[in-house]
Image: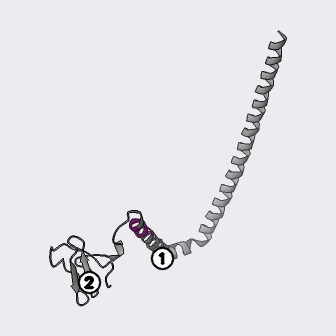
Amino acid sequence: MKKDHLKSEIDSSLVEEARKTLLGAKDWLLEDMALMTAYWHDKMGYTEAWVDANWHLVLEEGNELIDALDEKEDAALLWLINNVNNNPVPLEECHVAGDNVVAGTYHCMACRHDNVIEKAQPLPTCEVCHYGLMSSHGGNE
């Protein structure tokens, strides 16, 4: 009987210790949540106050900001396409028939024929296969 009583006391103390640990963790989590909530409200309040005070700047310069972000997004997308897909020809060096191009050599993406353009003009289709996608990769442009 004594052994059972001792085991019961050990189990009780383990349960009590686990309860205290869980209560401490709960209190710690609630305190952290309160701090995060206060920080978020403070940050949002600051942002709202700034927008209220500077709304005219947001309206005036918003279009320029959107254009700048679009340019960065386009450059990032182009880099991603060129590098992730391991494209043999960078997209910025691809040209479609009808694009205005400068004098140089344009390689057909279908038959690999070198089409020589003498002067700046709209890009014609390939002289051999009439495919409309060319590359100036490794050529003059």
Q: Quadrant of the C terminus?
A: bottom left
Residue 15: x, y in percent? 76, 26
**Predominant SS along the magenta part:** helix
Residue wearing tag 1: 64
The boundaries of the magenta stretch are 76-82
Q: Residue furthest bottom?
A: 119
Residue 78 in the magenta stretch? The answer is: yes
Query: Residue at the spot x=79%, y=18% of the render?
Result: 7
**Gap between marks 1 and 2 measured at Cα:** 37 Å
Q: Is residue 43 above or below residue 72?
A: above
Q: Is residue 19 above or below residue 84?
A: above
Side of 70 relative to 49 (left or right): left
Q: Nearer the viewer, residue 126 or 101?
A: 126
Query: Residue at the spot x=82%, y=13% of the render?
Result: 3
Tell me which amino acid carries mark 2.
Thr
- Mark 1 or 2: the one toward you: 2
Q: Nearer the viewer, residue 29 or 103?
A: 103
Quarter holding residue 28: top right
SS at circle 2: strand
Tell me which amino acid carries mark 1.
Glu
Quarter holding residue 29: top right
Residue wearing tag 2: 105
Residue 85 in the magenta stretch? The answer is: no
